[in-house]
Image: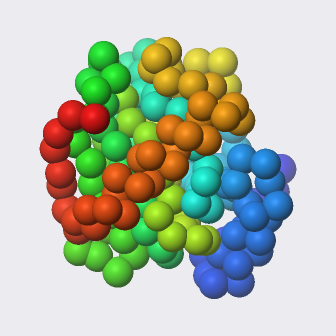
Amino acid sequence: MNRPALQRIDQTLFNALAAEADQRPRQRCNHNFHQEAEPVQRFLNVLQPGTYVRPHRHQRDREGAGFECFLVLQGMIGLLIFSPEGEIVQTETLSASGPVRGVEVAEGQFHSLVALERDSVIFELKQGPYQPCQDKDFLQRFPQERTPAAEDQERSWRQRFLESPATGAQTGND
């Protein structure tokens, strides 16, 4: 497949992806800059409030290759870091207007994202190639996507951020 010489990351693209995310049952939409087989995954992920990202981690065959980097380009995202037992050990509020705009999550670290503003856009970078059946290791104690329990879980996480709108790291158990 031929790739354009230049791929713009602009407000027109953000608006189109946000409109698409609004229409999808999962309330999110990816726009890949990479092909699935490429060794580096680069993409935009647009999240609307209400989308549920089941806690998961990434592990790869090569040590250190399971990292995931998030940079918020528009809106605000809550990041939750979990222990292997499913307890929240840290939260971060990531916002396009700062002071924390992005993070890199280490390999093997369980995490989830919560959209705190409409039309939130993040740029994600992680090791490829993308292999759907091996991409994520889910924390089993949390509900599967698109279930009433998942909706309740997402609402409680979002409320946690909205009740204490810290701009940086928070720690504590849930």
In the image, residue 83 above or below residue 18:
above
Give the residue displayed 42% in from the left and 27% down from the top: 57
| Residue 166 picture quarter | bottom left
In the image, residue 162 above or below residue 107:
below
Between 174 and 37, the one nearer to me in the picture = 174
Give the residue displayed 55% in from the left and 52% down from the top: 42
For the image, the number of numbered tags is 0
| Residue 101 picture quarter | bottom left
Q: Find residue 25 and report its horizontal and vertical position in percent.
A: 79, 48
Query: By what rule are the colours in the image chosen?
Result: rainbow
Between 130 and 103, the one nearer to me in the picture = 103
Left or right: 36 in relation to 23: left
Q: Find residue 160 and report its horizontal and vertical position in percent.
A: 34, 52
Give the residue displayed 59% in from the left and 18% down from the top: 134
Q: Is residue 144 visible?
A: yes
Give the residue displayed 62% in from the left and 81% down from the top: 10
In the image, residue 21 above or below residue 75:
above
Q: Is residue 69 visible?
A: no
Q: Find residue 119 and report its horizontal and vertical position in percent.
A: 61, 71
Dividing the image into 4 quarters, which one contains the C terminus? top left
Q: Residue furthest bottom?
A: 11
Q: Find residue 108 and report its horizontal and vertical position in percent.
A: 34, 24
Between 2 and 46, the one nearer to me in the picture = 46
Left or right: 24 in relation to 106: right
Left or right: 157 in relation to 138: left
